[in-house]
Amino acid sequence: MSTSSPKPVATWSAEDWHARAKTLSLDTRLFIDGAFRPAADGRTFTTVNPATGAPLAEIARGSQSDLNVAVAAARRAFRSGSWSRQAPRARMAVLQRFADFIEAHADAFALLDALEIGKPVSSLTGFDIPCAVTNLRFAAEAIDKMEGAVTNTAQEAFHYILREPLGVVGLIVPWNYPLMMACWKLGPALATGNSVVLKPAEQSSLSALLLARLFSEAGGPDGVFNVITGFGEEVGQALALHGDVDKIGFTGSGAVGGLILEYAGRSNLKQVTLECGGKSPQIMLADCDLDTAVRNAVIGSYANQGEVCAAGSRLLVEEAIHDAFVEKFTATTRALFCPGDPLDPATTMGPLVDAGHQQKVLSFIESGRQEGASLAFGGGIPRDLNAGCYVEPTLFTGVDNAMTIAREEIFGPVTAVIPVKNLEHAISVANDTDFGLAASIWTQDLRKAHRFAREVAAGMVWINTYFDYDATAPWGGFKRSGNGRDKCLEALTHYTQTKSVWMSLA
């Protein structure tokens, strides 16, 4: 599956990508204990290309039986110490090779995710894959920076604190950034010495299976990284309920996140960290640099087809600049985002992940109409793209924060403009939500910016920017957006536990 052309993938044309797709080999079996194998009962499910509606592959449909085998393999590997007790720099070397292998297979990863979920290859090669590699390398470099402690006790005692891996970790990742989200969680979990059972979303299984193979080829011991493909209500639920799984790391909907907390309580009180999406506000004050603010607002709204947990889809615009903002936003959207073939590097917006999600997004658009919002542009399926799961970039104006399109996470290219009177009003509207993942403000007044940063209930705040990121920066939110953090050093601590050790010197 390595790159078959001497040309860098960044220079490939649509013809190059389509030609490569025809030669792409797919292994669609489960990956357990260092090897691919079919599901125990032989069942499969069909994954569909959302750009064309054509069947793409038959994927192994894992079951409770398969999961039990994977968890047992992960526990056996953990207890053997082949990974958990390996010298930190030896683990680091394996993870660095793993990152190198992902980078070397950029063409395959880009094609797998483009074909399964419709994400444009330009987005995958320009963002998802580099970000996945960077975060994996960051976690690898942090391995020998994780320290215990020796405390200051009485002379007749010696007390120290060990930081140890948890054991077997279950990771459940979403379909909107399949490779990147997997690496965000795999990096810390593996770096700290755990064994992993990964459950990818059923819409995006293929890149996870390639990841597992490459980890093995990089020197990862058998049983340390396992992948069980299948459905959430079968494999995901069983993973969260499993009594021999020590932690679940989850990114997905708030409804499923709540179930995982329930399953943890019903089973073994396993640790759980959740990232459950948002309804993030972007505040546009009258003194902002309007052109820059508009461009970033458009990207924050429609990047990745709007299928982003931190999409800035609530635009809180000060009344004095409302009309000018909407006019510029409309023109900028048409310039930046045009739906098309995901394998064409010129495409900036692909289809939504599947037909069911397309219909869900269209139903939100209809609710906006029914509840009295004004449709500024979009609202339907792009002309000549009826075979796929496309939805046009859509903007509503005249939105009240009580409307459905202002309160529910749509997870599609639908954005709402909400007029606000001033900063105080904007903060009130921004915080009037069940979510708290991200927020931004656009202003030249530093006092207003810092006030907003203090008072907004969000885990991530951007000032005069949106979607800036770094491996050192925590990613996570407040309220129904979940708990815990991805990326950053703090993320590694989520996959460890401390042990207090006393020794008498009397």
Image: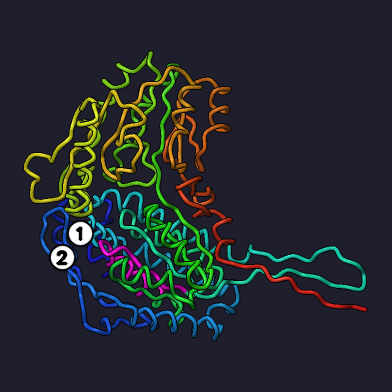
Q: Residue at x 49, y 49 (%)?
A: 475
Where does the image place residue 223, in percent across and percent down from the top left?
Answer: 43, 81
Tag 2: amino acid? Leu
Q: Residue at x 51, y 53 (%)?
A: 483
Q: Residue at x 54, y 58 (%)?
A: 491
In the displayed structure image, the side of residue 101 where residue 96 appears, left or right: right
Tell which circle, 2 or 1, labels the residue nearer the N-terminal end: 2
Tag 1: amino acid? Leu
- Whether residue 209 appears in magenta in the rendering, the answer is yes
Quarter of the image where one finds residue 144: bottom right
In the displayed structure image, the side of residue 336 where residue 275 appears, left or right: right
Q: Give the alpha-carbon distance from disc 2 to disc 1, as whole Å.
A: 8 Å
Picture disc at residue 56: 2
Task: Give the crowd class for mark 1: few <14, some 14-19, many >=20 residues within 10 Å.
Answer: many
Picture disc at residue 250: none
Where does the image place residue 107, in percent across and percent down from the top left?
Answer: 27, 61
- Whether residue 80 appears in magenta in the rendering, the answer is no
Query: Relative to 291, is 304 above or below?
Result: below
Give the position of the C terminus as an image quadrant. bottom right
Instruction: List the residue tagged with mark 1.
Output: 115
